[in-house]
Image: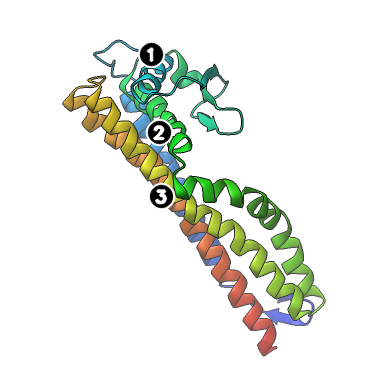
Amino acid sequence: MYGYGGYHYMFDWTYLLVLAGLGLSLIASANVNGTFSKYSRVRAMCGMTGAMAAQRVLQLSGITDVRIEHISGKLTDHYDPRTKTLRLSDSTYSSNSVAAVCVAAHECGHAVQHQVGYGPLVLRSTLVPAANFGSTLAWPVFFAGLIFSMRPLLTLGIILFSLAVVFQLVTLPVEFNASSRALKILESGHVLGDGELSAGKKVLGAAAMTYVASLAASVLQLLRLVILARGRDRD
């Protein structure tokens, strides 16, 4: 038997929610790694590397003030709106695979969103400080509420964690939209052929599912906090 403060139980079944979230995240991660690895062995007919494709997509989008840089790691690609910098990883920057071209184009999609002031991207950028603050303090505050039997701390912990969940929710349309923009530009600009675009959809679709799984895991964590808080109230 164990518990928090005076709140005891034989088995905390809410850990099953954590395990379910972890399972979803692992499945999504394995899927994106497997899909990326598969199509990273397929050479793009255009012969462009990820860096070259990124430059082409930006050009087709009328964007001339975004820098393209190389960053170490695998699938660490990202667009930094603060400095208008597109950073491509080892697995993308100099690779001429279909996977590399599509990942690079996806990050360009974020640059396009930034240029046109895409609403969800603006909202996500605004939420970054609150989400970071919430994800850092949520669990310490919540567990302090459990230990000291203080309902206000439990509620505050749930609110703080909710900020991170909202951030992940807003991230979904941002990521899906970036992929949609990327694929349209790759098609209209004749960077990839029809068969390659089909492969690209699989790569970007698998990547998008990691965000869906992450959100699902966070929602399950939030549900766990609510259940634990209600259990404390009944104690």
* Side of 100 where 221 appears, left or right: right
Q: Quadrant of residue 210?
A: top left
* Side of 124 where 92 appears, left or right: left
* Side of 95 where 86 appears, left or right: right
* Side of 198 where 180 appears, left or right: right
Label 2 sits on a secondary structure element that is: helix
Residue nearer the viewer, 121 or 30: 121
> Could you tell me which residue is drawn at 66 percent across and 54 percent down?
130
Spot occupied by residue 122 in the image (x, y as percentages of width and height): 52, 46
Spot occupied by residue 45 in the image (x, y as percentages of width and height): 24, 13
**Badge 1 is on which residue?**
49
- In this rendering, the count of numbered labels is 3
Q: Amino acid at mark 3?
A: Pro
The crowd level at tag 1 (other Cα within 10 Å; few <14, some 14-19, many 20+) is: many
> Could you tell me which residue is drawn at 30 percent across and 10 percent down?
47
The crowd level at tag 3 (other Cα within 10 Å; few <14, some 14-19, many 20+) is: some
Label 3 sits on a secondary structure element that is: helix
Dot 2 or dot 1: first in sequence order is 1
Per the model, the C-alpha gap separating discs 2 and 3 is: 12 Å
Q: Amino acid at mark 1?
A: Thr
Spot occupied by residue 37 in the image (x, y as percentages of width and height): 37, 27
Q: Nearer the viewer, mark 2 or mark 1?
A: 2
Spot occupied by residue 12 in the image (x, y as percentages of width and height): 61, 73
Per the model, the C-alpha gap separating discs 2 and 1 is: 17 Å
Per the model, the C-alpha gap separating discs 3 and 1 is: 27 Å
Q: According to the image, what is the colour scheme of the structure?
A: rainbow
* Mark linked to residue 173: 3
**Badge 2 is on which residue?**
109
Question: Decide: marks 2, 3 in contact (CB < 8 A)?
Answer: no
Q: Which quarter of the figure is the N terminus placed in?
A: bottom right
